[in-house]
Amino acid sequence: MSPWEQRRLGEYAFFRRGSFPQPYGNPEWYGGKGAMPFIQVVDVNKDLSLVPETKQKISKVAQPKSVFVPKGTVVVTLQGSIGRVAVTPYDSYVDRTLLIFENYLRKTDDHFWAYVIQNKFNIESRKAPGGIIKTITKKALSDFQVKIPGYEEQKSIGELTSKVDKLITLHQ
């Protein structure tokens, strides 16, 4: 086992917000031939997962104006139900109400990272006035302190938490 290192999230992870063309209601942005899943807050479950099929599909015309994420990307909700985290199970595009973790300082297990981020938001929401984070800025997020072990230990923890989450889901 390697020692865990503590870092500011902004020093360890590289992230950005998703995007979507405006106005939201323009029917040209949705569906049609070549449409892809479009992840919004409503599509992120509480158990580090996404719904099997997104509520909306983004049109071929709107895709260049959004942000593509490949399967296995960690995303976190920033508005509404703040702090819901998921690892994308399919290629998709992401709305501006979500944060996308694009890269890391070193090799990182996605399931471990999703668990770390979810726990960090749970801790920070308890510290917030009234116990709820109403908004989160990039600066505040960058300053979150996270502890990170070596990759092999991350992988073991990620697999274990994933199995436990699946068992809990089955029992519910």
Image: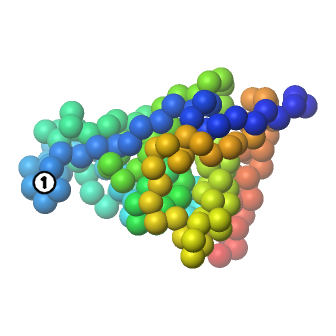
| Residue 153 left/right relative to 59 | right
Q: Which residue is drawn at 73% across and 45% down?
A: 159
| Residue 58 left/right relative to 83 | left
Task: Please state which amino acid type lies under the numbered disc 1.
Answer: Pro
Q: Considering only vertical position in the picture, is 93 above or below 125?
A: above
Q: Nearer the viewer, residue 65 or 87?
A: 65
Q: Which of 76 and 138 is in front in this view?
A: 138
Image position, residue 171 (x, y; %): 70, 73
| Residue 83 left/right relative to 65 | right
Image position, residue 78 (x, y; %): 44, 55
Crowding at dot 1, Cα within 10 Å, few <14 / some 14-19 / many 20+, comes out as: few
Please indicate, yes or no, whether residue 32 appears anywhere in the rendered image: yes
Image position, residue 65 (x, y; %): 21, 37
Please indicate, yes or no, whether residue 110 appears anywhere in the rendered image: no
Question: According to the image, label 1 marks what residue?
Answer: 23
Q: Which of 128 and 50 is in front in this view?
A: 128
Extreme residue in the top direction: 106
Quadrant where the N terminus sits is: top right
Q: Residue at x 57, y 76 (%)?
A: 130
State the SS at label 1: loop
Quadrant where the C terminus sits is: bottom right
Q: Which residue is drawn at 54% across and 46% down?
A: 141
Image position, residue 97 (x, y; %): 36, 53
Q: Which residue is drawn at 60% across and 30% down?
A: 11
Q: Considering only vertical position in the picture, is 60 above or below 135?
A: above
